[in-house]
Image (cartoon, coloured by chain):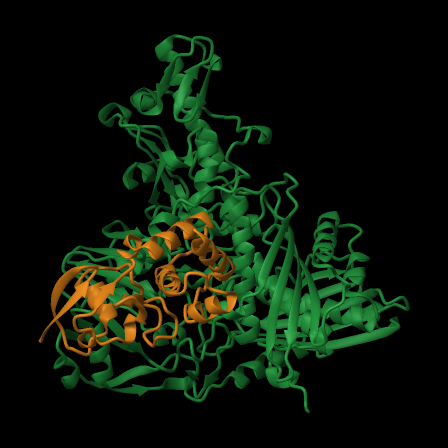
Amino acid sequence: MTTTEARAVAADPPAHLSRRKFLASAAGGGAFMLGLRLSVAHGGESTGTFTPNAFIRIGGDGQIVLTMPYVEMGQGTYTSIPMLIAEELEVGLDQVRLEHAPPNEKLYANPMLGEQATGNSNAIRGAWKPLREAGAIARTMLIAAAAKQWNVEPASCRAENGEVLHTSSGRRIKYGALAADAARMAVPANVAVKDRKDFRLIGTPAKRLDTPAKVNGTAIYGIDVRPQGVKIATLAQSPVFGGHLKSVNDTAALAVKGVRQVVKLEDAVAVVADHMGAAKKGLEALVVEWDDGPYAKLSTADVAAELEKATLGSGAVAQNIGDADRAMPGTATKIDAIYQMPFLAHAAMEPMNCTVHVRKDGCEIWVGTQAIVRCQAGAAKTLGLPLDNVVVHNHLLGGGFGRRLEEDGVIRAVQIARHVDGPVKIVWTREEDIRHDMYRPYWFDRLSAGLDEKGRPVAWVHRFAGSSVIARYIPAAFKDGLDPDSTEGAIDLTYGLPNFRAEFSRVEPPGIPTAFWRSVGPSHTVFVVESFMDELAAAAKQDPVTYRLALLDKNPRAKAVLALAAQKAGWGGALPTGSGRGVALQHVFGSYMAYVAEVEVAKNGTVRVRRVVCALDCGTVINSDTVKAQVESGAMFGITAALYGEITLKDGRVEQGNFDTYQILRMNEAPAVEVHVINNGDAPGGLGEAGTSLIVPAVANAIFAATGKRLRKMPIDQAVLKQIT
Amino acid sequence: MAVTINVNGAAHSVDVDGDTPLLWVLRDVLGMTGTKFGCGMALCGACTVHIDGAPTRSCVTPVDSVGASKITTIEAIGKTDAGARVQKAWLDREVVQCGYCQSGQIMSAAALLASNPRPTDTDIDDAMSGNICRCGTYVRIRQAIKQAANA
């Protein structure tokens, strides 16, 4: 299928669609169907190729190609999405070849985001129905083609392992041999997907399709592309956000062997060379003067002070149940607390990079991105080109975590590449990657709760302030001071609370770009809510698991995962002095999850997470091994944040720069992780991020159990935990 | 100045400054992109190669320091006994997620097993803690190293 053909059958303008659909899904509406119905079967007669929709292409040679509308950044989509299609198409995973989708919002938009993007743990949720239907449509048409050849009823045939069989006669024919005929069959208006009892792939621990190339060095990430004649560039951007380039002396840089060119932009400078070694050496040889601009004195404390101020007044009411203000004064015990969470960098292992070839009338881009359409649009706008003149090739991502939902790196690369003759690969140093990230917002939270004489929470008021990423990313989804991401996890709690109010104040930090970060809104809200719930249990002098269970009578799925995690972890069992267990529970991204973390706090304050037990209910499991892998991964990612994660500003500059100052959990610090799955057959929930948001409160609550110290500010401050001897 | 290096059994002459890190010679000059850039300061291990069998961070190794030593990269580690066992265990245990760090992880693990066929957990910690995995695949890396050791 070509882009042109696809556009010819599409209807609505994409921006309009995006907003409407995002709002629909955010408001709890079902998955919005896009793409599948808009595409048509065609191309069979001239090429012998069967293309029943935008996701499947079967050649006359039998080659089955699946086009991936969601990107692979480690979370296993390049296996789980093919599983959905192959289940219905009746082929094995060893029979398919995968292609990255080109930018085409009409065909490949994520129904839950309203645009062609991979994020918010919703690839499987969005794909669950349409991509099984895509496979079922293809299967139906292949069966119809075979039945016509044999002059039998389609109902007397079935598909199996890439062939159609006529059951009574035993005749069989391969899909490849049917491709040309299948392309001439009518596209069925309605197809039935398989009953779950007939699943042969869904629910299995399928081997990942992307792994073999990743263990022998042949996998191609964005940073690995090498168009003919490509030069390599690296860059320095204004150390203070909003600053400008004042002057550059590039004499010494241009004298470095292999350096070809120095490109000066308004707020950045790049050195173009034959290889990155020369580019870096050239960059170091530049003498650069910056005009720091209006944020030259900004510090993290300034940002926190602004947020704190905002929580003293009312915010936009995100949820209001009962009357918390009326209930609060009469409560037997009142608890107040303030929580804070830091800016965080994404620090994907593959540093930011993008390869661009700007030609007179067009532009070609090679990148690994979570949001390919934004990259195409950003490049087109920067160059003043029509969208169709910008070709974007997507690649495997060496980690995304939300960083690669942003097109800033592509725009920056295009700004440089337009001054370069031929293709150029712009590779950021790790320091640039950390210092010019777009950060998980800083959050400031103020909570109050009132308990009745039995210790049950009867009033809960939560005010929080921070940046709304949605307001920038999807402006129309920010409405009446609220957005669906910042509040997820702070509202619609699993617990039954009779009087509950949550208020959000959007306060943008001056100059500092913020963005989605693995587990997005819940990366903040779940820590605060689950830590505070633990505080209430402690105030009520009750066991944290028992306390929570008592509030879950109306939420059996939440109750089940909590009880299972506690049981598997040996909750209540003895632990050595200095060790403790902490629990946390969440229902976000459509999945229920409970963690019990076991930590050990040394006398010098060092925290070691020893063991993590997870119980989860993510509805129907697609790839059972990927589910486990994502929980393990999410836990490690969150433990890194809890122990080390903090971006701070001093004099407008990010103080961290590489893995010495922005530390990542290492092998010797990694806990054992156990995963227990309740597979209940409901529609699938998301899982790429859930493990990250939930581990932080589980660890903090375990530290409280071990030491009696309540940590209300992340990351963990070892000095607070140090025992004076 | 031309520098001659031996990579995976083949001699290559490259015309770069002698202090150019080996990583960039491999990736940008020779086009062997399996070895990855992560930090440029020997902090993350993504760029690990073997030099005469020893795991080495190529991002801080000047190309003129290698001399006649034999460089082995991820592209050829499968030809060694330990490397092949490690790659197989990585597949069997489904270690990989985004995979970007795994070239370096595999090179560190192969070097460990080549010198220490039965590593303890502490040996694994010591050999592998220089390799960061942002996806946090550590639990499976440990299991895979143990499997490879017993293969």
The residue under the point 13% across, 64% down is: B12
Residue B129 locus on image (x, y percent) = 45, 70
The residue under the point 42% across, 64% down is: A403
For the colour orange, the matching chain is B
**Is residue A125 in view?**
no
Q: Which sits in the foreground, B56 or A367?
A: B56
Quarter occupied by the C terminus of chain A: bottom right
Give the side of residue A649 with respect to residue A395, left or right: right
Quarter occupied by the N terminus of chain A: top left
| Residue A249 versus residue A66 in the image, above or below | below
Numbered marks: total: 0
The residue under the point 61% across, 59% down is: A488
Colour in which chain A is drawn: green
| Residue A50 versus residue A211 in the image, above or below | above
Residue A162 locus on image (x, y percent) = 39, 26
Residue A569 locus on image (x, y percent) = 70, 58
